Amino acid sequence: MTREEMARAYFAEGYNCSQAVVLAFAEEIGLPPAQLAKAASSFGGGMGRLREVCGAVSGMFLVCGFLMGYDDPQASTEKAAHYARIQALAAAFKAEIGCDTIVCRELLGAEGKDTSPTPSARTASYYTRRPCGDMVGVAARVLENYLRENAK
């Protein structure tokens, strides 16, 4: 199963966009899935349903940090290199979806106006009118390709 398929499957199970992407890479990260799901839980709905940065994109960035990030606060070269990776991932995501944004409310259109903290019910209608399943798939695919092309 590809990371894209895994992310889509996690999303269909009810995980938020960020969790779905992060869980698709749980094996590579090497932390327990429950711990990863908790770490990513705040980023669904564009950061706690504020409709800011897309949760799928946040999950992609979180995984990249786990796998290729830096931990020395004085490591300016490593920090710059990591920020360049994040910017490259954002650009690749935007190119894949054919849209110049990673903002949840803009990706959702009219659906993005709802910022209530209460998540939408995951009905058949939810899955057909929302692009979120596609967004998690694209984010996972973009990250999987990036990791393969830039393996350390």
Image (cartoon, grey):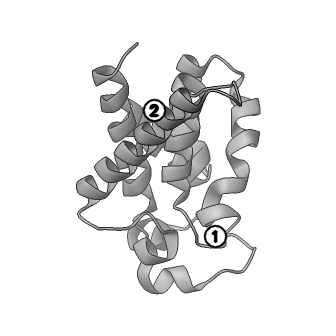
Q: Residue at x 46, y 73 (%)?
A: 125
What amino acid does circle 1 point to? Ala
Q: Residue at x 42, y 37 (%)?
A: 85
Return the mark for residue 81. 2
Disc 1 target residue: 121
- One can see residue 71 in this view: yes
The quadrant in which residue 47 appears is bottom right
Closest to the observer: 79 or 135? Answer: 79
Q: Secondary structure at mark 2?
A: helix
Left-right relation of 129 to 96:
right
Q: Does 90 sit above or below residue 79?
A: below
Per the model, the C-alpha gap separating discs 2 and 1 is 40 Å
- One can see residue 2 in this view: no
Q: Residues within 10 Å of mark 2 (few under 14, many from 20)?
A: some
Q: Residues within 10 Å of mark 1 (few under 14, many from 20)?
A: few
Spot occupied by residue 57 in the image (x, y as percentages of width and height): 48, 51
Q: Secondary structure at mark 1?
A: loop
Q: Quadrant of the N terminus?
A: top left
Q: Does 57 sit above or below residue 35?
A: below
